Amino acid sequence: MARVVILGGGIAGHTAALHLTRMLGRTNEVVVVTPNSMWNWIPSNIWVGVGRMDTEQVTFPLAPIYRRKGIDHRQALATAIHPEGTSDDHTPFVEVTYTDPTRQGETARLTYDFLINATGPKLNFGATPGLGPDGFTKSVCTAGHAVEASQSLAKAIEKMKRGEPQTIVIGVGHGTCTCEGAAFEYAFNVEHEVRQAGVRDLADIVYLTNEFELGDFGVGGLTFTQQGFQTTSKLWTESLFRERGIRAITGAHVERVEEGVVFFEQVDGSKDSLAFDFAMLLPPFRGVDLKAFDADGVDISEKLFAPNGFMKVDADYTAKPFADWRAEDWPKTYQVPSYPNIFAVGIAFAPPHQISQPRTSPNGTLIAPSPPRTGMPSGIMGKLAASNITALIKNGSKAKMKTASMSDMGAACVASAGSGLRDGSAASMTMYPVVPDSVRYPVTGRSVADTYGEIGLAGHWIKALLHYLFIYKAKARPGWWLIPE
Ligand SMILES: Cc1cc2nc3c(=O)[nH]c(=O)nc-3n(C[C@H](O)[C@H](O)[C@H](O)COP(=O)(O)OP(=O)(O)OC[C@H]3O[C@@H](n4cnc5c(N)ncnc54)[C@H](O)[C@@H]3O)c2cc1C
């Protein structure tokens, strides 16, 4: 019998846990260590953030699902990995601290045969002074943050109803942020809500982003065919912003936020500030606070983790200029080379480099959108790790490993642009591959036939359908595995 320990019960970890129990049966042990009791469908936090959904609609308790599926659920935070065990006992283990109210603060060691690190991001608000719910801006990264954002937005709308103009700033709060698609989505939803409330003329909505140009989305932009003509996500997105009267400030690094004012620098080195009444700025991400130790207790964190805290896997991490980046630099199995029984999936793995071209201002400030690892690739990686671990448990060294590089993986993104069965809309985009491959696709780096963008009501219906489908799947209801990642 083998024991697989999964750190993180989010999109990647929960997907891995469900597939592992399906593939391995109950003769092996699957343990999920995750600090929250609730699962959150994060993409729908956008709708919580504009008051169109409540937290109960985007979260559910994990414990009953794990009980039904025979998964050992530990509501705890992993703090350290010991991949070589100790000098007395070489069985690898992780150290955890319980967050479960019945065992709060208790620590434990969990041994493993295989480990999946699916701990996602640390929301690094601390990188920008004044950023985040403990500072002066809102966030929609967790359901709780989104509720606060919605309450604050409602107050701004109330003020506009009383005739007070409001400046609304939405975007990213640092030059190295990722997830620009989520900020774009929230900006469009807020614009929709303000219009629905009949106060659009009193709202100055500003999109503040580290993207060098609109439509970059941290993937270097897209080229696609629309109604027989080739266009770019830059043109397409600029037109969407113009139609909605949203101003954009691009290539920006937020230096700090004070009450009602955001201070930023742009790629050309210019510095400016913007006064706001309501601001939602996403934080930069880094790896969670996990350490690693060898059998003698020596700290080997640098061996396992990149400087940004994400876990190093089977990628080529050699530092090289932008022009030399290759699709094959990206990981294929997400296995840690020095400890092949450890996998890191979803946001937890360290990307070898950005996808979008990084830039530095004349003042030396790095303004470089980080690569997005969205829900679909995170789910695919979770399933891949489950499948490869199953093969390793069943066939040992003869196991044939499957691969799923982001340079050979497509992604679909449906960015809501306003909720409502009849008046909603969404920008739907597909891209293949996520990481451009200039060898296979010399002109644009991607397959133009498989890269696509469209906006309309149908997109909203798809986004709403995906909300219910993915929650159904995460609850492991009958036939859940037939729903693709
Ligand atoms: C506002 C917003 C909107 C988004 N919209 C979309 C969208 O429309 N489409 C899309 O594809 N993607 C979207 N994304 C991205 C998507 O949410 C992520 O790609 C996805 O959640 C990544 O999955 P993950 O499992 O790597 O991380 P997560 O889902 O964040 O899961 C990480 C888990 O690890 C746990 N954890 C953290 N630290 C520890 C620790 N020390 N020990 C144990 N467990 C730990 C966390 O509590 C969490 O449960 C959005 C993201 C945001 C913030």
Image (tube, grey):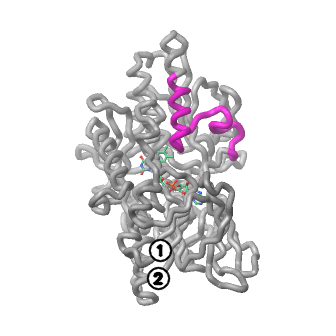
Q: Which of disc 1 and disc 2 is earlier in sequence?
A: 2
- Classed neighbour count for the residue bearing mark 1: other residues with Cα under 10 Å, few (<14), some (14–19), many (≥20): some
**Furthest residue to the top?**
163
The reply to whether the magenta stretch includes residue 146 is: yes
**What residue is pinned by disc 1?**
29
Task: Residue 146: give x, y in percent of width and height.
Answer: 52, 37
Most foreground residue, 22 or 414: 22
Residue 357, quarter of picture: bottom right
Image vertical order of residue 282 relative to residue 103, above or below? above
Most foreground residue, 12 or 66: 66
Task: Residue 426: give x, y in percent of width and height.
Answer: 34, 38
**Furthest residue to the bottom?**
398
Residue 485, quarter of picture: bottom left
Q: Tell me if 432 is positioned left or right of 313 in this view.
A: left
What range is drawn magenta here?
126-154
Q: Tell me if 198 is positioned left or right of 370 in this view.
A: left
**What residue is pinned by disc 2?**
1
**Residue 438: which numbered mark, if any?**
none
